[in-house]
Image (tube, rainbow, N blue to C red):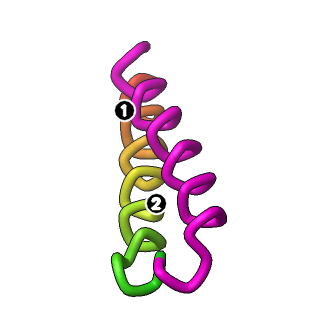
Amino acid sequence: MACFLVPAEEAIVIRALEKAMGEKARVWKLHWLNRMLWGGVLLLAIEHI
C-alpha cells in the first residue's frame, strides 16, 4: 500500500512547491512531474485493486 502513498505525498509536495515558485515552476516543468506522479499513483492503485 505504501508504494502508491509515497508518490502521492511527493505529488502534494511538488504541487505546493509549484505554487510557491510561481512562474519559475514553468521553466523547471514541475507541472509535468506532478502529472507523472499522479498518473503513477493512479496506475498503482488500479493494479492493487
1 or 2: tag closer to the N-terminus? 2
Neighbour tally class for label 1: few under 14, some 14-19, many 20 plus, Cα within 10 Å: few
Q: Which residue is mark 1?
A: 47
What secondary structure is marked by label 2?
Answer: helix
In magenta segment, residue 22 = yes
- Looking at the rendered structure, the kind of residue marked 1 is Glu
Tell me the SS state at disc 1.
Answer: helix
x and y, in percent, of residue 3 in the image:
34, 22
Q: Residue at x 40, y 36 (%)?
A: 7
What residue did someone put label 2 on? 34
> Which of the 4 image quarters holds residue 6?
top left
Q: Which residues are magenta?
A: 1-24
Q: Residue at x 55, y 56 (%)?
A: 17
Q: Main secondary structure of the magenta part?
A: helix
Instruction: Name the residue rendered at 51%, 33% in the picture.
Output: 9
- Residue 29: x %, y % from top left: 37, 78
Residue 33 lies, with reference to residue 27, above or below; the image says above
Tell me the tag on residue 3: none
- The residue positioned 53% from the left and 43% from the top of the image is 13
Residue 47, by quadrant, is: top left
User: Does residue 20 sit above or below 12 in this rendering?
Assistant: below
Q: Answer left or right for 9 relative to 33.
A: right
